[in-house]
Image (cartoon, helix red, strand yellow):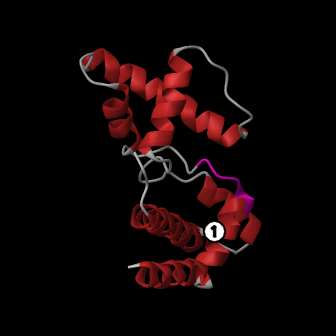
Amino acid sequence: MAKYFGSIMDFTQERNDDIMRAYRVQLAKANYIVMPEIFRLVAESPASRFWVSEERAAVEVSRMLVGKPFSRMRANKREMFEEIYRRYLLLREKHPDKSVYELVSKVVRQPAPKFYLTPRTVGEFIYRIRNGWYDKQYNRYRDIEKLID
């Protein structure tokens, strides 16, 4: 299944909104602001969903089902896929007739216990969001699409 540009940007906007929601919550709770600590708290905050595509999650779950080891993957991502896999197995018991993709799609849209990002990555995302970097990228690609059409 091919991805089209809008789907990636929609996903990115939703993820960024979720990060900023968690960021505002942590700022409101803080007695004093220490940005590295705020970023750590955001990273560990519950997320509205698992921020991975259904396709990528289904590939990783399929690999786990046949016992293939993770490719070189950061600890956060490995932990996220292990949680998705755990939930997938529970859901498969209830719905053995459903495909891996169908069940994984349900799992990734469930609330996640955290963002599975490093505090540094959270800080980079927040910096880019606040400085309009994503908006500029979106506008640039939209302008390119207009030229192609």
Nearer to me, 108 or 19: 108
Query: How would you rate the neighbour count of disc 1 (Cα within 10 Å): few for under 14, some for 14-19, many for 20 or more?
Result: some
Identify which residue is drawn at 32% across, 38% down.
106
Q: Residue at x 50, y 47 (%)?
A: 52
Is 122 located above or below residue 76 in the figure?
A: below
Residue 129: tell me if it is visible: yes
Q: Write down the residue under mark 1.
A: 125
- Residue 61 rendering spot, x and y as whole percentages: 50, 27
Which span is picked out in magenta?
116-120
Question: Can the viewer see residue 83?
Answer: no
Image position, residue 81 (x, y; %): 55, 34
| Quarter of the rendering occupied by the C terminus | bottom left
Q: Residue at x 54, y 48 (%)?
A: 114
Q: Where 75 falls versus 9 (above or below)?
A: above
Q: Position of residue 69 (x, y in %)?
A: 67, 21
For residue 37, what is the image quadrant? bottom right
Q: Could you tell me what secondary structure mostly forms the magenta stretch?
A: loop
Q: Is residue 119 magenta?
A: yes
- Residue 72 lies, in percent from the top left, at 74, 34
